[in-house]
Amino acid sequence: MVNSNENTVITKAVIPVAGLGTRFLPVTRSVPKALLPVLDKPLIQYAVDDAVEAGITDIAIVEDTRPVGSYFHSMPDLEGKLREGGRNELADQMVDISSRARITSIKQLEPLGLGHAILLAKNFIGDEPFAVLLPDEILWGDHSSTAQVLDVRDRYGGNVIAVTETSWDDVHTKGIVAGTSVEPNVIAVEEMVEKPKREDAPSNLAIIGRYALEPTVFDFLSQQRRGAGGEIQLTDAIIDCMNELPTHGVIVDAARYDAGVPEGMFGATLHQAAKDPTMRQMIVDFAAEL
Ligand code: UTP
């Protein structure tokens, strides 16, 4: 197997946010899912923070006609007003948000699938390995989950994907992988399938929205083949790469919430709220009342 990019450090990431967000209707009629907040921070910021902690400096946000990337624009008027009012700490936070990474916006005008959204970032990425983060997968741990994926990629090369055990009742909604363990929490992937029926699923290890990919995936994405649900699937392109590249799955050490559905967002909100003494007490009091 050839992997000429093995020693290249990954500094670019793609964050696709142009899906319809149908599992979060009606709010996603007008608010992009990536701008829905866990308390006071939108999902897109958690994803960008996770990427920046992993050493990413350049990020392409693939969005529909509703701007998400503009969240990271500098806002000198707002910053100025906050400073005039003596709220320097908040103003500093605003400056930090707009200077964390270089953000590029790319438009996906039709939601043809995750694979299609990534394909649109081909020119931005060029011929180097890159990271992909799906912001509706929240992964909170001591270390950035993207950093955990990039670490495995540094050691094994090829394509690396974050995975987690999921309920067998859910395998038909996810990309599923199976393979051989090569070290604790790392598997060499031998089988991968997008949204299998429960009886066809090779395992219950689900792909969860953090990837390190070789630019070879663009060769297959360019064919624009339709897969599960009639969409151009990223999983299918990664499967196509498996003859040429090693593929590993890493069970990331992180609390995971699927914020693409209201109950996952609620779990994530409780997780964050419990860190604040006042809100924690509100949760405890409410639970006692229940
Ligand atoms: P999802 O399938 O989780 O999101 O796609 P969705 O399609 O927005 O939501 P549902 O299933 O209708 O509720 C995974 C990621 O890929 C992006 C989504 O925005 C999400 O971040 N995506 C998906 C695109 O950018 N373009 C697409 O055509 C499809």
Image: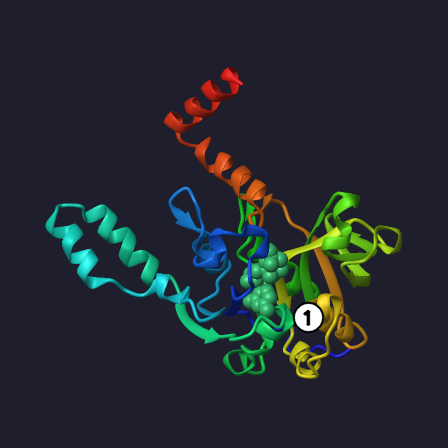
255 or 114: nearer the eye? 114
Residue 138 left/right relative to 274: right
Q: Is residue 73 visible?
A: yes
Residue 219 left/right relative to 78: right
Q: Position of residue 126 (x, y in %)?
A: 55, 82
Q: State yes or no: Cβ of the residue under disc 1 lies below 8 Å from any atom of ligand 1.
A: yes
Is the residue marked by circle 1 packed among few (<14), some (14-19), or many (20+) residues within 10 Å?
some
Q: Is residue 8 visible?
A: no
- Residue 282 vertical placement versus 97 (above, below): above
- Residue 101 vertical placement versus 5 (above, below): above
Q: Quadrant of residue 236?
A: bottom right
Q: Residue furthest right?
A: 199
Residue at position x 48%, y 65% in the image: 56
Q: Position of residue 109 (x, y in %)?
A: 51, 75
Q: Position of residue 46 (x, y in %)?
A: 46, 52
Residue at position x 52%, y 74% in the image: 108
Residue at position x 73%, y 46% in the image: 165
Ligand 1 picture quarter: bottom right
Residue at position x 48%, y 62% in the image: 55
Q: Which residue is mark 1?
A: 231
Q: Position of residue 235 (x, y in %)?
A: 71, 67
Looking at the image, what colour scheme do you see?
rainbow
